[in-house]
Image (cartoon, rainbow, N blue to C red):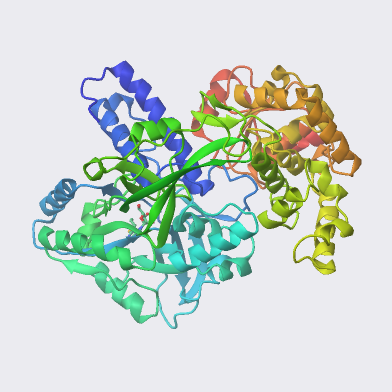
Amino acid sequence: MGNKEISKKQAQERIDFLRSELNRHNYRYYVLNDPEITDFEYDVMMMELASLEKMYPELATQDSPTVRVGSDIEGKAPGAREFRQYRHRWPMLSLGNTYNIGELQDFDRRVREAAGEKFAYNCELKFDGTAICLSYSRGQLVRALTRGDGTVGDDVTDNVRTISSIPSDIGDVPWDFEIRGEIYMPFASFNALNEERADIGDTPFANPRNAAAGSLKTLDPEEVRRRGLECVLYHIIGDNLPFKYHSEALQWAASRHFPISQYSRLCLDMDEVRQYIEEWDTRRKELPFATDGIVIKVDDLALQARLGYTAKSPRWATAYKFKPEQALTKLLSVDYQVGRTGAVTPVANLDPVSLSGTTVRRASLHNADQMEQLDIHIGDYVYVEKGGEIIPKITGVEVSKRPQDAVRPSFPTLCPDCGSPLVKDESEARHYCTNEACPTRVKGAFLHFISRKAMNINAGDATIDQLYDKGYIKELPDLYRLDMEKLLTLDGWKERSAQNFLDSIAASVRVPFSRVLFALGIRHVGETTARTLTARMRSIEAMEKASKEDFLEVEDIGEVIADSLVDYFADSGHRRIIEELRGFGLQFADNSAAAAVSDRLAGCTVVVSGNFSRPRDEMKALITAHGGRNTSSVSGRTTYLLAGEKAGPEKLAKAEKSGVKIISEEEFYSIINS
Ligand code: IVH
């Protein structure tokens, strides 16, 4: 990391950057289940932050990501179901981790110093899933909580009861206890789930961990049952439990039919630990589920108690993480794919190779800059890795294996699909086809329009391809002009399938405005932005009339989105399409209950913090509906700090200092209903 010579000022800047990036990645990982970077990249940033905080202890803070456990609660994913929350009896902590055997020796040295006598480590696989805490009372499963923020977790008991390996009744046990472990999704279930999602136009999960975490928080327990989740348990806690050793507790749990790993091993010294690591770094590739390292735990519970905990993790255990699995294979050719927004992505075709449970044939090269950085040649042997994204990426080139006649692929200057010139967007380093009539863009726009989270029209790629090729659909409103006669000309279509399709198109006119806005496919306007815009501006007319400044007034809308919105609505073609769609009955205004607007909060700026009886997004929507403005930080200009349970202490202190009125949820309701 080479930051030895860094000044305090530079350190502060870098620390601010790393903290905000790590918080953003925590949110993507724990809440959205949609990471952007690999665990390794995350860990490297975390290590850099920790080393800077060590170098300048005065810059360390209590709320730094190095101290806080990542939360799956904070800032709910848009549309996520609210679960009841409960406080953990014992906080659910994380584990220290390293990629480096030397640091593992340091851990061992610290433990040995504290122990003073011989002791053993229990080495276990580190299962790559999502943590779960099961409470048993008199032998009955009474509650299952997610890790949450480590202190408070989501109650997912109903969902957990659908996992058949978790016993709900273990017979007569006189003591109450908690047993913790990991819920994970085996590769087979993961691959099947993703195939199914791709078929119905849902975004596939990036990896089994995200799939497990996302599934556990699904609305419908029956859906959870279908997804094939598994569980492994590795930690028992309680008051006065009758065990002296961790391994003994696990054996007891196995005797009570809890799912306990069969791959753990007691190791008497670091040589044995190292052997275990080496063995599993290879053998894990044959396992039917994902692992990302091994966990080393002091086996003696009295010694564990003596070693205790830091704020974030136990001192009696640590994790050694495996470097992400890589495969070396030959680059056969590069394709250039045009997406629905016109972005052109280079995709590598590879000699098929097996990697973490799947066969990899294609990998992303992201953009022209990335290709240049890797200095990639056709015929090169390249390293592929699975990162946070669905499609694996190329992380390096084995230059020593480069054939003599290998040539660099050249990035096209014209759209591979329609031949229009490509334009490079400097801010994103991507090339775009700007021709709105480009066939791939048009078909992509239809696929986006009909997708589940947009208009939810029942059809797939093949149908859109046929409709387009036959010339039935050129612009979005054409979908509403389809009839039985046209549909019966499609290959393999019968009256029944055609009628289903027509019914599904007819039903789409009831889809609420925010989803219609999302369906239009305005660049940079995703689901969340569409929802925010709808809550704030309420109708498409308001948006058509809005200036860039008006858009910038809406929370979370910055320059890029505002520019894109203004450009979109300035185009008379787009306005005509909207008019035609409106003519078919689509919703272009928000008439929901929250729109029962008043102006009781007119001119008021409100900051919302903490947990409420309803999702925070709804509280914010209420504020907007009553004429108020949401902002994220407290300042002299804030009218109210609306503080729920566990409101941020810093926000409370700031409000008190600046004389901002702090109101409770009840007080808030009495203001808007007065
Ligand atoms: S022990 C107090 N053992 O990895 C420490 N954790 O990165 C309790 N994990 O929070 C954790 N396999 O969710 C433990 N064999 C194992 C594990 C394991 C996976 C997870 C767990 C933990 C995370 C830390």
Q: Position of residue 151 (x, y in %)?
A: 45, 50
- Residue, far right: 583
Q: Position of residue 351 (x, y in %)?
A: 37, 55
Q: Quadrant of the image for the N terminus?
A: top left
Tell me: 60 left or right of 150: left
Can you tell which quarter of the image residue 597 is in?
Answer: top right
Tell me: 56 left or right of 23: left
Q: Quadrant of the image for the C terminus?
A: top right
Tell me: 482 left or right of 112: right
Can you tell which quarter of the image residue 567 is in?
Answer: top right
Q: Looking at the image, in which quadrant does ligand 1 appear? A: bottom left
Residue 646 visible to an observer of this rendering: yes
Tell me: 473 left or right of 247: right
At 29% from the left and 48% from the top, the residue drawn is: 96
Residue 540 versus residue 319 in the image, above or below: above
Q: Position of residue 138 (x, y in %)?
A: 46, 76
